[in-house]
Amino acid sequence: MNNFGYARADTVADAIRQIAGDPTAKFIAGGTNLIDLMKENVERPSRLVDINRLPLRKIENTAGGGLRIGALVPNTDVAYHPEVERRYPMLASAFLAGASQQLRNMASVGGNLMQRTRCYYFYDTATPCNKRAPGSGCSAITGVNRIHAILGMSEHCIAVHPSDMCVALAALEAVVHVVGARGERAIRLADFHRLPGDRPEIDTNLQAGEIITAIELPPRGFAENWTYLKIRDRASYAFALVSIAAGLEFEGDAIKEARLALGGVAHKPWRDQQAEALLRGQAATRDSFARAADALLRDAKGFGHNTFKIELARRGIVRALTQAAGRMPQSQSRKVVR
Amino acid sequence: MSFRCTGNSPRSEWRRPLAHKTAVARRAPARVPTPEKVAITLVVNGVKRELLVAPWKTLLDALRDDLDLTGTKKGCDHGQCGACTVLLDGRRINSCLTLAIMKDGAEITTIEGLAADGRLHPLQEAFIEHDAFQCGYCTPGQICSAAGLIAEGRAKTIDDIRELMSGNLCRCGAYSNIVAAIEQVMQGRKTRS
């Protein structure tokens, strides 16, 4: 870790002022990803602005019937919040699928949005990586790429976003509230993270000097028919190879509304409204689920080690939709296959 | 993670440099003057401790090096093994992934602070009774994590204990005995004294 300066911010305005005009300074909240990356010399900030004392720790109902989660609320507190458990069980489940309880106690929801890829080459400063050192090349494309993207990647980067929370937020159509020197903005979760394109070093559409203040959930929570299915190399405390957030609403036997988002497959949570549209009006059958899976994966491409993810994702989507339709959401502690 | 691949032979179409970055060399680390050490206060195992820390000192290193509380172990130093688990304001955290300076004023309980009045903590007794360790390196973290788990009150089944203890690795493989020890304390069974 390199040496750095440290300052605390007491208000949001103070935080924005302290970070303004200094691209080498970073905010720190839980620190679980940033400090790890600093120890690896991947992140080398000159100064940290500690935002842990900002008043962003509330979970509140919104006037519109949704829920607003302050950016500094620890992951655990969202996962176990009674309103989240009752109205947005898919989100609670996604939180509990991620990391360990120690890390969930530390990590904030704002930081969860800002966490960086777990690509081995991004972490290894001895290897080329366009995300870490733009222009140096992508080692993963021709290297060991078992954990890498099958959708939305570019010739410059095939890294995936590691969050579970963000996958559920994508399915739930959450909105991210941010503030900067030029005022407040609300960014749809779908637009918050970027695809790599030719600027893989930029993960999100957050502008320099902006700070995340809250995540807002719309009223629709899919609390009847939902699942968060995470498929990984070990049963707990591992990043997803493929994860699926699924939510369904029914009118009689027909699917009225469907939401489907995937983690572990792309540079951002992958939601495909074309695939969702194929489910509307259909009965909850294996065939209709398989058609949606095929549509979602129509452009999927493997790089050798990760090619298995395409079939894994296809089967995972069918299984997740079956769990959601059958009101048998995946338990995050009892990992039986059903 | 220091995984290194030897099989990344160049394939020109995938390794073409980014046009807008070709002239840019690797980022040089910003040169900044070394900041002064800062005075902070930690309440560790019920005792107020004042110390001077550089901003980059982790809570783990402050406990071990500055306060000589070496019961908390440094395993991976990256939040992957749980050996550094302590209770911060009653909640279990990885002390390797937080900076001491960020925790000014916090209450911290380490393995050294669990025994009271000359008696081991029930979890310490249960770990001995169930032989829930072999080399013992992960044990302080396991016990602090289990104390946090019991305080959370979320674990109802064996599956829940396993899942909620998954942030603590034991490379000797004492898991079944660790789970049995925790289960015993959760159920409030009388332990050997």
Image (cartoon, rainbow, N blue to C red):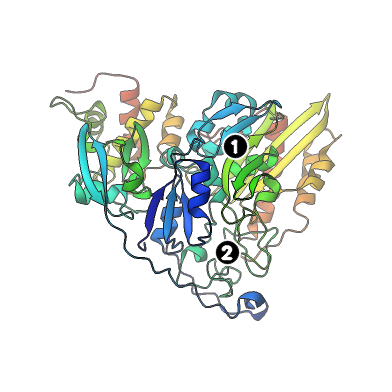
Q: Is residue A81 left or right of residue A297?
A: left
Please name the amino acid that badge 2 sits on: Asn
**Residue A200 or residue B53, whichever sits in front:** B53
Taking the image as shown, residue B8 lies to the left or right of residue B110, namely: right
Residue beneath the point at 66% across and 47% down: A262
- Residue drawn at the location 61% of the way across and 23% of the way down: A86
On the question of residue A284 being in view, the answer is no
Say which quadrant the C terminus of chain B sits in. top left
Residue occupied by mark 2: A145
Neighbor class of circle 2 (other Cα within 10 Å; few <14, some 14-19, many 20+) is many
When the figure is inspected, residue B14 is found, relative to residue A245, above or below; the finding is below
Q: Secondary structure at mark 2?
A: loop
Q: Say which of A282 and A20 sits in front.
A: A20
Separation (CA) of disc 2 from disc 1:
27 Å
Q: What amino acid type should be assigned to the residue bearing mark 1? A: Val
Which numbered tag is attached to residue A337? 1
